[in-house]
C-alpha cells in the first residue's frame, strides 16, 4: 500500500516508526463514525480488527512530508492505549484465523483465481502455491464495494466465510475502470 503522509500527527508517527521496528497498525473508522474522523478532541472509535504492516520503503518529501510503501503482515486485534504523541496508539495481538479445510480451499481456488485475474488484469501468472487468504486479499484490493461490505469481509476470522463474502461482492460489483478518461471533443 502506498501512502502520502502530510498531516503533522502522521508525520510524527512515521518518524517514530522509522526510529523503531518500522511496524504500523492501520485501523478503520466504522462507516457510521466517518463524520468524526477529523475531531481530535473526540476521536471516533475504530474497528477492533486492523491491519499491521511494515514500512518497506520510504521517501522524505519537501515540507517534511513522506511517501511510504507499507507491506501488509496480517490482521490484528487492537485495543487503544493512551498516547503522549499526536497520534493514537494501540496494543495488538495477532488475529487467529480459522483456516479452510483442504477440500474447502480446493473448491474455491479456481473461482478466486478467476476473480483475481478479472480484477487484476496486469497480473499475468498467479503462482500455483498462493495461499487462499492471499487470493482473497488480492481480490478485495480491487472490489469497489461499500464500506460496510468491506468491513464484514476484512473482520471475518473464518477464511472460508471471508472467501465466500469476497466472491459474493465480486459477483455483484462491476470491475473498476482503471483506464484514463477519454478526451472529449467540444
Image (cartoon, rainbow, N blue to C red):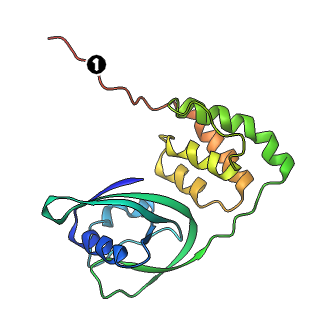
Taking depth in this image into account, of 53 and 93 the one nearest to the observer is 53
- Indicate left or right for 125 with 1 as reference: right
Q: Is residue 117 above or below residue 158?
A: above
Taking depth in this image into account, of 104 and 120 the one nearest to the observer is 120
Q: Position of residue 148 (x, y in %)?
A: 51, 53
Image quadrant where residue 42 sits: bottom left
Image quadrant where residue 172 sits: top right
Q: Is residue 127 above or below residue 18?
A: above
- For mark 1, give the secondary structure: loop
**Residue at which label 1 appears:** 182
How many marks on residues? Answer: 1
**Which residue occupies 22% across, 66% down?**
7
- Furthest toward the right, the residue is 103
Image quadrant holding the C terminus, namely top left
- Indicate left or right for 172 with 178 as reference: right
- Furthest toward the top, the residue is 185
Taking depth in this image into account, of 8 and 49 the one nearest to the observer is 8
Amino acid at each position: 500500500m502506498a501512502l502520502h503522509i502530510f498531516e503533522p500527527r502522521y508525520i510524527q508517527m512515521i518518524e517514530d516508526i522509522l526510529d523503531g521496528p518500522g511496524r504500523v497498525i492501520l485501523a478503520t473508522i466504522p462507516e457510521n463514525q466517518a463524520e468524526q474522523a477529523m475531531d481530535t478532541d473526540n476521536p471516533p472509535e475504530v474497528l477492533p480488527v486492523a491491519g499491521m504492516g511494515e514500512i518497506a520503503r520510504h521517501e522524505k518529501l519537501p515540507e517534511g512530508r513522506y511517501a511510504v510503501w507499507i507491506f501488509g503482515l496480517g490482521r490484528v486485534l487492537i485495543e487503544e492505549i493512551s498516547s503522549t504523541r499526536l497520534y493514537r496508539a494501540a496494543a495488538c495481538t495477532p488475529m487467529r484465523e480459522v483456516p479452510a479445510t483442504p477440500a474447502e480451499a480446493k473448491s474455491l481456488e479456481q473461482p478466486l483465481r478467476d476473480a483475481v485475474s478479472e480484477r487484476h488484469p496486469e497480473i499475468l501468472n498467479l503462482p500455483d502455491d498462493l495461499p487462499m487468504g492471499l487470493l482473497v486479499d488480492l481480490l478485495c484490493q480491487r472490489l469497489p464495494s461499500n464500506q460496510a461490505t468491506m468491513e464484514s469481509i476484512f473482520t471475518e476470522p473464518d477464511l472460508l466465510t471471508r472467501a465466500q463474502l469476497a466472491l459474493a461482492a465480486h459477483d455483484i460489483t462491476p470491475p473498476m475502470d482503471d483506464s484514463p478518461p477519454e478526451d472529449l471533443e467540444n
